[in-house]
Amino acid sequence: MADPSTGEPRRQTKSTEGKRDTATQQEPERLDLFKFAPFRLNRLAAEVSAALASEYRERYGLDIPEWRVLATLGFRREACSAQYVAQCTRTHKSTISRAVTSLLERRLIERVENAEDRREFRLRLTRKGKTLYEELIPRLQQRERDIMACLSADERDTLDRLIGKIEASLDLIQTSEEADAKQAY
Protein backbone atom coordinates (compact mmCIF):
# COMPACT_ATOMS: atom_id res chain seq x y z
CA MET A 1 0.00 0.00 0.00
CA ALA A 2 1.39 3.49 -0.91
CA ASP A 3 1.92 6.41 1.50
CA PRO A 4 -0.55 9.10 0.33
CA SER A 5 1.87 11.94 1.12
CA THR A 6 4.88 10.54 -0.79
CA GLY A 7 3.39 8.00 -3.16
CA GLU A 8 6.04 5.49 -2.08
CA PRO A 9 5.17 2.08 -0.70
CA ARG A 10 4.61 2.03 3.01
CA ARG A 11 6.91 -0.04 5.07
CA GLN A 12 5.05 -2.70 6.96
CA THR A 13 5.45 -2.99 10.65
CA LYS A 14 5.73 -6.35 12.32
CA SER A 15 2.19 -6.09 13.61
CA THR A 16 0.73 -5.50 10.11
CA GLU A 17 2.99 -8.15 8.53
CA GLY A 18 1.71 -10.80 10.93
CA LYS A 19 -1.91 -9.96 10.22
CA ARG A 20 -1.38 -10.07 6.46
CA ASP A 21 0.49 -13.38 6.66
CA THR A 22 -2.24 -15.08 8.64
CA ALA A 23 -4.91 -13.64 6.38
CA THR A 24 -3.23 -14.96 3.22
CA GLN A 25 -2.12 -18.25 4.72
CA GLN A 26 -4.64 -20.95 4.30
CA GLU A 27 -4.71 -24.18 6.15
CA PRO A 28 -3.44 -26.95 3.88
CA GLU A 29 -6.16 -29.04 2.32
CA ARG A 30 -6.69 -32.34 4.09
CA LEU A 31 -7.20 -35.59 2.25
CA ASP A 32 -10.25 -37.45 3.51
CA LEU A 33 -9.19 -41.03 2.93
CA PHE A 34 -12.75 -42.26 3.18
CA LYS A 35 -13.60 -40.23 0.07
CA PHE A 36 -10.32 -40.96 -1.77
CA ALA A 37 -11.06 -43.60 -4.43
CA PRO A 38 -7.62 -45.32 -4.43
CA PHE A 39 -7.82 -45.79 -0.65
CA ARG A 40 -11.37 -47.08 -0.85
CA LEU A 41 -10.61 -49.49 -3.70
CA ASN A 42 -7.54 -50.85 -1.93
CA ARG A 43 -9.41 -51.30 1.34
CA LEU A 44 -12.31 -53.00 -0.42
CA ALA A 45 -9.96 -55.32 -2.34
CA ALA A 46 -8.17 -56.27 0.87
CA GLU A 47 -11.44 -57.05 2.67
CA VAL A 48 -12.85 -59.11 -0.21
CA SER A 49 -9.54 -60.95 -0.56
CA ALA A 50 -9.55 -61.74 3.17
CA ALA A 51 -13.15 -62.98 2.99
CA LEU A 52 -12.27 -65.31 0.11
CA ALA A 53 -9.01 -66.37 1.78
CA SER A 54 -10.89 -67.88 4.69
CA GLU A 55 -12.43 -70.36 2.23
CA TYR A 56 -9.14 -71.72 0.91
CA ARG A 57 -7.06 -71.26 4.05
CA GLU A 58 -9.31 -73.27 6.35
CA ARG A 59 -10.22 -76.04 3.93
CA TYR A 60 -7.01 -76.40 1.91
CA GLY A 61 -4.27 -74.73 3.93
CA LEU A 62 -3.48 -72.22 1.17
CA ASP A 63 -2.33 -68.67 1.77
CA ILE A 64 -3.17 -65.77 -0.55
CA PRO A 65 -0.02 -65.97 -2.74
CA GLU A 66 -0.44 -69.75 -3.14
CA TRP A 67 -4.05 -69.23 -4.16
CA ARG A 68 -2.99 -66.57 -6.67
CA VAL A 69 -0.59 -69.03 -8.30
CA LEU A 70 -3.24 -71.77 -8.44
CA ALA A 71 -5.90 -69.38 -9.73
CA THR A 72 -3.65 -68.09 -12.50
CA LEU A 73 -2.57 -71.57 -13.58
CA GLY A 74 -6.14 -72.84 -13.29
CA PHE A 75 -7.65 -70.44 -15.78
CA ARG A 76 -4.80 -70.74 -18.29
CA ARG A 77 -4.89 -73.28 -21.09
CA GLU A 78 -1.12 -73.57 -21.19
CA ALA A 79 1.71 -73.61 -18.68
CA CYS A 80 3.20 -70.23 -17.81
CA SER A 81 6.18 -68.78 -15.98
CA ALA A 82 6.28 -67.60 -12.38
CA GLN A 83 7.06 -64.15 -13.79
CA TYR A 84 3.76 -64.24 -15.70
CA VAL A 85 1.94 -65.15 -12.46
CA ALA A 86 3.62 -62.26 -10.65
CA GLN A 87 2.62 -59.80 -13.40
CA CYS A 88 -0.92 -61.16 -13.59
CA THR A 89 -1.55 -60.97 -9.87
CA ARG A 90 0.48 -57.80 -9.21
CA THR A 91 2.40 -59.73 -6.54
CA HIS A 92 6.14 -59.34 -5.89
CA LYS A 93 8.19 -62.05 -7.61
CA SER A 94 9.84 -63.19 -4.36
CA THR A 95 6.39 -63.78 -2.83
CA ILE A 96 5.34 -65.78 -5.88
CA SER A 97 8.61 -67.71 -5.77
CA ARG A 98 7.94 -68.80 -2.17
CA ALA A 99 4.38 -69.78 -3.09
CA VAL A 100 5.63 -71.79 -6.08
CA THR A 101 8.14 -73.63 -3.88
CA SER A 102 5.41 -74.53 -1.39
CA LEU A 103 3.00 -75.69 -4.11
CA LEU A 104 5.74 -77.76 -5.77
CA GLU A 105 6.48 -79.45 -2.41
CA ARG A 106 2.77 -80.21 -1.99
CA ARG A 107 2.67 -81.53 -5.57
CA LEU A 108 -0.15 -79.18 -6.55
CA ILE A 109 1.88 -77.72 -9.41
CA GLU A 110 4.77 -78.97 -11.51
CA ARG A 111 7.53 -77.51 -13.62
CA VAL A 112 7.62 -78.21 -17.33
CA GLU A 113 10.44 -77.34 -19.67
CA ASN A 114 9.87 -74.42 -22.00
CA ALA A 115 10.28 -75.86 -25.49
CA GLU A 116 11.41 -72.47 -26.84
CA ASP A 117 13.96 -71.75 -24.09
CA ARG A 118 15.35 -74.76 -22.22
CA ARG A 119 16.73 -72.47 -19.50
CA GLU A 120 13.22 -71.47 -18.46
CA PHE A 121 10.64 -73.62 -16.75
CA ARG A 122 6.93 -73.09 -16.93
CA LEU A 123 4.35 -74.05 -14.34
CA ARG A 124 1.11 -75.97 -14.58
CA LEU A 125 -1.32 -77.66 -12.24
CA THR A 126 -0.82 -81.34 -11.46
CA ARG A 127 -3.81 -83.67 -11.41
CA LYS A 128 -3.99 -83.10 -7.64
CA GLY A 129 -3.83 -79.33 -8.21
CA LYS A 130 -6.58 -79.45 -10.84
CA THR A 131 -8.80 -81.43 -8.49
CA LEU A 132 -8.28 -78.88 -5.72
CA TYR A 133 -8.87 -75.98 -8.14
CA GLU A 134 -12.09 -77.52 -9.52
CA GLU A 135 -13.33 -78.21 -5.99
CA LEU A 136 -12.55 -74.72 -4.77
CA ILE A 137 -13.88 -72.63 -7.67
CA PRO A 138 -17.61 -73.21 -6.99
CA ARG A 139 -17.04 -72.34 -3.31
CA LEU A 140 -15.31 -69.08 -4.22
CA GLN A 141 -17.94 -68.21 -6.80
CA GLN A 142 -20.62 -68.74 -4.16
CA ARG A 143 -18.66 -66.55 -1.73
CA GLU A 144 -18.45 -63.87 -4.43
CA ARG A 145 -22.23 -64.06 -4.92
CA ASP A 146 -22.71 -63.72 -1.15
CA ILE A 147 -20.48 -60.62 -1.04
CA MET A 148 -22.21 -59.05 -4.06
CA ALA A 149 -25.73 -59.88 -2.83
CA CYS A 150 -26.07 -56.37 -1.41
CA LEU A 151 -26.25 -55.12 -5.04
CA SER A 152 -29.07 -55.63 -7.51
CA ALA A 153 -28.32 -57.32 -10.85
CA ASP A 154 -28.32 -53.91 -12.54
CA GLU A 155 -25.94 -52.51 -9.91
CA ARG A 156 -23.58 -55.48 -10.36
CA ASP A 157 -23.60 -54.90 -14.14
CA THR A 158 -22.93 -51.19 -13.60
CA LEU A 159 -20.12 -51.92 -11.14
CA ASP A 160 -18.55 -54.35 -13.61
CA ARG A 161 -18.78 -51.78 -16.41
CA LEU A 162 -17.31 -49.00 -14.25
CA ILE A 163 -14.40 -51.16 -13.06
CA GLY A 164 -13.79 -52.02 -16.72
CA LYS A 165 -13.64 -48.32 -17.59
CA ILE A 166 -11.07 -47.66 -14.88
CA GLU A 167 -9.02 -50.67 -15.97
CA ALA A 168 -9.13 -49.45 -19.58
CA SER A 169 -8.04 -45.95 -18.55
CA LEU A 170 -5.00 -47.56 -16.89
CA ASP A 171 -4.32 -49.78 -19.92
CA LEU A 172 -4.89 -52.95 -17.92
CA ILE A 173 -5.64 -56.16 -19.77
CA GLN A 174 -9.23 -57.12 -19.06
CA THR A 175 -9.70 -60.62 -20.48
CA SER A 176 -7.75 -63.85 -20.39
CA GLU A 177 -7.89 -63.96 -24.20
CA GLU A 178 -6.23 -60.55 -24.39
CA ALA A 179 -3.60 -61.68 -21.86
CA ASP A 180 -2.89 -64.85 -23.83
CA ALA A 181 -2.58 -62.92 -27.09
CA LYS A 182 -0.13 -60.43 -25.56
CA GLN A 183 1.58 -62.98 -23.28
CA ALA A 184 1.40 -60.37 -20.56
CA TYR A 185 -0.79 -58.80 -17.92
Image: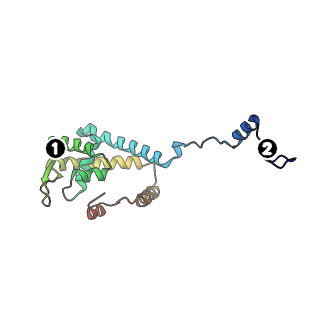
In the rendered image, residue 117, in percent from the top left (x then y), is placed at 14, 58
- In the rendered view, how is the structure colored? rainbow
On the rendered image, what quadrant is the C terminus found in? Answer: bottom left
Q: Which residue is mark 2?
A: 10
* Residue at 28 percent of width and 50 percent of height: 86
Please, what is the three-letter code of the amino acid marked with disc 2?
Arg
Helix, strand or loop status at disc 1: helix
Helix, strand or loop status at disc 2: loop
Whole-number angstrom distance, CA of label 2 to CA of label 1: 80 Å
In the rendered structure, are the residues bearing label 2 and label 1 in contact, judged by CB atoms less than 8 Å apart? no
Hey, which quadrant is residue 14 in on the image?
top right
In the rendered image, residue 47, in percent from the top left (x then y), is placed at 40, 42
18 to 136, vertically: above or below? above
Hey, which quadrant is residue 20 in on the image?
top right
Apparent side of residue 143 relative to residue 161 in the rendered image (left or right): left
* Residue at 45 percent of width and 56 percent of height: 159
Hey, which quadrant is residue 52 in on the image?
top left
Apparent side of residue 147 relative to residue 12 in the rendered image (left or right): left
Apparent side of residue 24 relative to residue 58 in the rendered image (left or right): right
Q: Which residue is mark 1?
A: 104
> Disc 2 vs disc 1: which is toward the camera?
2
